[in-house]
Amino acid sequence: MAKKTEIDNLGWLVVMVLTIFFDPIVQGINRILRGKVIIGLLWVITGGIFGIGWIIDVITMLIHKDITFLA
């Protein structure tokens, strides 16, 4: 199971807004904090893996209210 981070303690709506507007930065840092350094850096550098990861993150947040894709 993935480690809990400070981002996990924020409310669902706050995380959703951050995901929509700042996904590559916020979720990249979240992945780094969870110990997935390579995926996190890739997320930040490529802009959420060229937007595909961003779309998956937003859909995952809407359906499950949690970030689970590569996290």
Image (spheres, grey):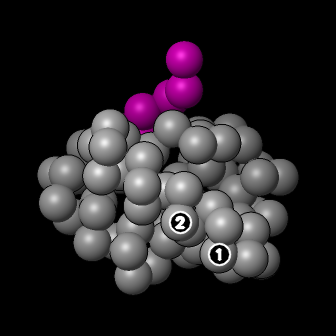
Magenta segment? 1-5
Reading the image, the residue beneath label 1 is 51
Is residue 1 something one can see in this rendering? yes
Say whether residue 62 is left or right of residue 70.
Answer: left
Q: Residues within 10 Å of mark 1 (few under 14, many from 20)?
A: some
Taking the magenta stretch, the answer to whether it contains residue 2 is: yes
Say whether residue 50 is left or right of residue 15.
Answer: right
| Location of residue 5 (image quadrant) | top left
The alpha-carbon separation of the residues under discs 1 and 2 comes to 6 Å
| Location of residue 20 (image quadrant) | bottom left
Estimate the x, y position of residue 33 in percent, counting from the top left: 58, 47
Instruction: Tell me if label 1 and label 2 are in contact, CB under 8 Å.
Output: yes
Say whether residue 14 is left or right of residue 30.
Answer: left
Work out which quarter of the rendered image holds the N terminus and state it: top right
Query: At numbered mark 1, what does the secondary structure look like: helix, strand or loop?
Result: loop
Q: How crowded is mark 2: few (under 14 residues within 10 Å), some or many (20 or more)?
A: some
Q: Which amino acid does label 1 sit on?
A: Gly
Residue 3 position (above or below residue 26): above
Q: Of the numbered discs in the image, which one, if any, rests on residue 36?
A: none
Work out which quarter of the rendered image holds the C terminus and state it: top right
Q: What residue type is labelled 2?
A: Ile
